Image: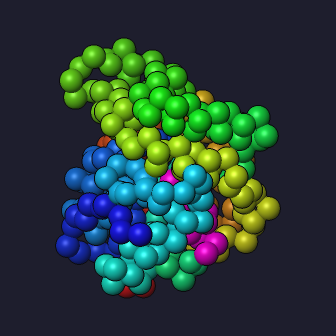
Amino acid sequence: MKLNYEKSGSQGPVLLLGHGFPFDHTMWNAQIADLSKDFIVIAPDFRGMGKSSPSGSAITSMEELADDLAELLDDLQIKKCSYCGLSMGGYVGWEFWLRHPQRLESFILCDSNAKCDTPDAAQNRLKTADRIEAENSCAFMAEIMKKNLMTNQTLASAESTDSVFSRYRKMVTENNPSGVASVARGMAQRKNFTNLLRTVQIPMLVLAGELDLLSPPEAMKELTDAIPNAQLALIPNAAHLAPMEQPESVNQAIRQFLNSIPSEQ
């Protein structure tokens, strides 16, 4: 599987960015622009999303997406990286940590968790996937999801051409319907990693918006406490899309964390 990706920066440790659902790598534009001053930043589109081609199967698993990342690193002749995944990108990150531990120097879990879906949540994902295919469009999702992903302040400036909401809506509405539906089904059957948290040996940063309704601060604190080597960074005035809503604060937290890790490259 050949992924579309953006690579920026010419020196420093490698930072691999995994986007959320149903987005693409451009959600990381602010991180790519800033962090590439100090790191080599690689931001792919997961298969079936953005400009990466879909696998053609009805279900794309988190395991497959993690293996795609390892293949991308092979193609780029990169042995190890730090990985930062937002929401669904975090689910992929857990599989990457489990399946390719030798590739991972550190893990940043951004507005995400280590749990599997509840039966009701999984069923809702399957219904969403069916609707995407029936309508051959992801457009309806932009409206349905927005209040859970962004702050009221962000939504209040939604009509600005270059607003966070406008960029969010563009990513969602222009995404590949068949690829998004396939990935949605994959998320519905993902593993529960909570029983493995105590076994995490690499440095880890748990990062989230203080106003995130999907990954609330209390849950993120509990998650951090369960991981031996983890730090917590809560981003003020941000919800689930913290890297887009408060890029400067997110970039500062990521840079500080990565600079504290001795690179093995």
Does the rendering let one see residue 264? yes
Seen in the picture, residue 98 relative to 165 is either above or below; the reply is below
Name the chief secondary structure element in magenta. helix
Q: Quadrant of residue 82?
A: bottom left
Decide whether residue 35 is among the magenta residues.
no
Residue 36, percent across and down?
A: 24, 62
The part of the chain drawn in magenta is 89-99
Q: For the point 46% across and 65% down, which residue is it?
A: 83
Decide whether residue 90 is among the magenta residues.
yes
Q: For the point 28% across and 74% down, which residue is it?
A: 12
Residue 190, percent across and down?
A: 68, 55
Q: Quadrant of the C terminus?
A: bottom left
Residue 234, percent across and down?
A: 52, 42
Does the rendering let one see residue 203? no
Q: Quadrant of residue 230?
A: bottom right
All told, the count of numbered labels is 0
Q: For the point 34% across and 74% down, which residue is it?
A: 13
The structure's colour scheme is: rainbow
Horizontal side, residue 156 vs residue 241: left or right: left
Query: Which residue occupies the foreground of this view, 234 or 152?
Result: 152
Horizontal side, residue 214 vs residue 119: left or right: left
Residue 105, percent across and down?
A: 49, 75
